[in-house]
């Protein structure tokens, strides 16, 4: 089983450009037989607040069409983010695109200060996946600021915890420390995806990483590089490999 974390540089509102970034990473992942790839928070639109109402998507949005096709053709689960419209409310969400054509939606549970002016919080949309006997839980950014979130993943008997985040260079160190603590406390293998480059007038922190369920940071990508961090299960252990766009 192989899972990949994509570290990309999205531009707010430039969805066509951002999709090209996604296609590149998915093609690279497919070349290495990856079963699931996860992207950062609001990867399709870039992290946004005021622009959210103009950039919302549903599971039927045309922007997802080619991603769905790639999921089916390459037999890969693709997890991408955007402002999501559900029942006339807007959430920060992840679309989980599956090779069968089924789409599941995860919505951010804990919001950063100020996000509540533009988005709703919801605990109702919290799907788990089971892939090759591994139970997977998802998270988005500020979810990892609240210990109740990874604790819930533990109580659901998840073995893998996949946060999609947007942390700055100033904040990423603290984020990694929290994830290492959760990994050890709740026996979770954690694969995190963050942005590189500038976004929302902030330098993203990068350092997309893999932390095993002993709390050991096994691999992280450089702050400013675009690429993939691929993890593969070998017996009872996981090993990791960074891959970069040439």
Image: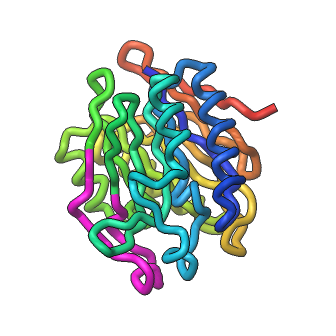
Span highlighted in magenta in the image: 107-127
Residue at point 64% right, 36% down?
A: 25
Q: Image check: 22 left or right of 124? A: right
On whether residue 110 falls in the magenta region, the answer is yes
Q: Nearer the viewer, residue 48 or 88?
A: 88
**Residue at 69% across, 67% down:** 199
**Magenta highlight: main SS:** loop
Residue in the picture at 34% in, 54% down: 106
Query: How are the residues colored?
Result: rainbow
* The one of 41 and 58 positioned closer to us in this rendering: 58
Q: Position of residue 197 (x, y in %)?
A: 74, 58
Q: In the rendered view, would you say 232 is above or below 118?
A: above
The quarter of the rendered structure image containing the C terminus is top right
Q: Quadrant of residue 51?
A: bottom right
Give x and y (percent) for residue 85: 38, 67
- Residue 163, magenta (yes or no): no
Instruction: Name the image quarter holding the N terminus.
Output: top left
The residue sitting at the right extreme is 246
């Amino acid at each position: 089983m192989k899972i990949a974390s994509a570290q990309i540089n999205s531009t707010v509102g430039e969805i066509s450009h951002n999709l090209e970034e996604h296609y590149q990473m998915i093609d690279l992942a497919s070349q290495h037989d990856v079963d699931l790839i996860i992207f950062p928070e609001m990867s399709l639109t870039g992290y946004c607040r005021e622009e959210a109402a103009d950039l919302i998507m549903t599971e039927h949005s045309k922007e997802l069409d080619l991603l769905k096709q790639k999921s089916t053709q390459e037999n890969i689960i693709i997890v991408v983010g955007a402002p999501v419209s559900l029942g006339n409310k807007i959430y920060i969400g992840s679309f989980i695109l599956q090779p069968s054509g089924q789409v599941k939606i995860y919505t951010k549970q804990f919001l950063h200060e100020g996000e509540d002016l533009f988005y709703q919080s919801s605990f109702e949309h919290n799907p788990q996946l089971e892939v090759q006997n591994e139970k997977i839980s998802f998270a988005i950014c500020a979810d990892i600021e609240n210990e109740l979130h990874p604790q819930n993943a533990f109580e659901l008997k998840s073995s893998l915890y996949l946060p999609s985040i947007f942390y700055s260079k100033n904040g990423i160190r603290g984020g990694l420390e929290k994830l290492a603590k959760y990994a050890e406390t709740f026996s979770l293998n954690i694969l995190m995806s963050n942005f590189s480059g500038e976004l929302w007038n902030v330098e993203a922190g990068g350092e997309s990483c893999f932390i095993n369920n002993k709390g050991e940071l096994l691999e992280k990508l450089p702050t400013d590089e675009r690429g993939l961090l691929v993890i593969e299960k070998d017996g009872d252990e996981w090993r990791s490999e960074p891959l970069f766009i040439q």
